Amino acid sequence: MTVAPPASYERTDRTTPTRVRERASYDREVVHAILDAGYVCHLGFVRDGAPVVLPTLYGRIGERLYVHGSTGSRPLRGAGRAGDAGMPVCVTVTHVDALVLARSAFHHSLNYRSVVVHGTARQVTEEREKRAALDALVEQATPGRSADCRPASAKELAATAVLRVDLAEVSAKIRTGGVNDEAEDLPLPHWSGIVPVAPAYGTPIPDEHLAPGTPVPGYVTAL
Amino acid sequence: MTVAPPASYERTDRTTPTRVRERASYDREVVHAILDAGYVCHLGFVRDGAPVVLPTLYGRIGERLYVHGSTGSRPLRGAGRAGDAGMPVCVTVTHVDALVLARSAFHHSLNYRSVVVHGTARQVTEEREKRAALDALVEQATPGRSADCRPASAKELAATAVLRVDLAEVSAKIRTGGVNDEAEDLPLPHWSGIVPVAPAYGTPIPDEHLAPGTPVPGYVTAL
């Protein structure tokens, strides 16, 4: 019998914001939706006592986040192999939804959705899990693509490192809505409001070696 | 006499990538251009030995990066006051330019531009520098806006914390171009190419209290 996970992640000291707590959420569906809306995360780890933050690709399968790297890269070498203690990481995903232009400089803000994952990264070594993770990484950026490309060879699989981070200590933070100006500032003449922003995809550019007439797949035009 | 800074940042061990070194750049103009194209960074710091990565706003003035926060927030409390030792941070800015869809799963990639800044964050306490930094933060997201809003009051200024990080140990990483498939994969039937992606701004939504007929400023329509 499979037990459904609780609807929310457990709040911990480090997932409790020190300010604007009403923007925080621990709801599993909210967290998943924010993660699923992106494919680039910022991976933080500690090297020689100092923080390092690198952008990288990720994919989610259930309550596991997979982060991409090369076996030669420093963060992944630090993460060791399965069975090791692993490497403490923080994985953050952020979407900007709007500029918030208030009448006062002080109340300028952004509408955004972000997820912060605290956890331990471990290298994925089991072949089946690694292949599933790589498919998830491709699907995360381009849903439908993993079934329409050549799967990794054994050599390519060995040259690719994948880190796994369990979704356990997780929080979302969301700002929505309009400007929050002070009442006495409302008569000021400055234009005020929000400017929506979102990623937009341009016209696909086929590879120069692509056979003429090869149609652009539906999963690409659907982006 | 002012001495112009050298054209490149000095390369250090931690700004030397362990792989794909040809994508790295230390050119000052390249770094500035990537920073100036964005306004959200991912700020990394260490708390209780573990990494923390939070999204926040930034602004650049010359060779200084200013990062926004509230005086109550944890990273800023850690950064102490001017004169203190400060807090080791890593500030990373990333722009995604295209999905790269190769014929092989292995060669899937992204075109991107990123900058990683290693340094020490210190709280800005001097009023003139703090005001200039707050203007820079507003300008970074919406050039032209800082002159068209009410400046911060003394109370608001005190409630806003700004961190300064000097641009000294800095590197950029850039991937451009098309797919890099293996020669033997070129005949495969899968569509292959790149899909450009960039932030797009929507129609500005005026605040409900805005006087009817207030025109949308040119610096907003120009976004």
Image (spheres, coloured by chain):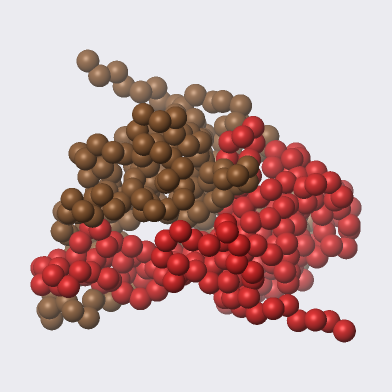
Chain colours: A red, B brown
Q: Position of residue A130 (x, y in %)?
A: 82, 59
> Residue at image x 80%, y 47%?
A85
The N terminus of chain B sits in image quarter: top left
> Residue at image x 20%, y 61%?
A104
- Residue B208 lies, with reference to residue A202, above or below; the image says below
> Which one is in front, B222 or B141?
B141
> Which one is in front, B82 or A115?
B82
Does the rendering let one see residue A135?
yes
Instruction: Name the residue at the bottom extreme.
Output: A1
The C terminus of chain B sits in image quarter: bottom left
> Residue at image x 23%, y 55%?
B156
Q: Position of residue B131 (x, y in %)?
A: 22, 45
Please state if A69 lies on the left or on the right of A186 as rendered: right
Does the rendering let one see residue A149?
no
Which quadrant of the view contains residue B100?
Answer: bottom right
- Residue A22 lies, with reference to residue A161, above or below; the image says below
> Residue at image x 49%, y 24%?
B10
Q: Position of residue A25 (x, y in %)?
A: 53, 72
> Which one is in front, A208 or A104?
A104
**Total residue callouts:** 0
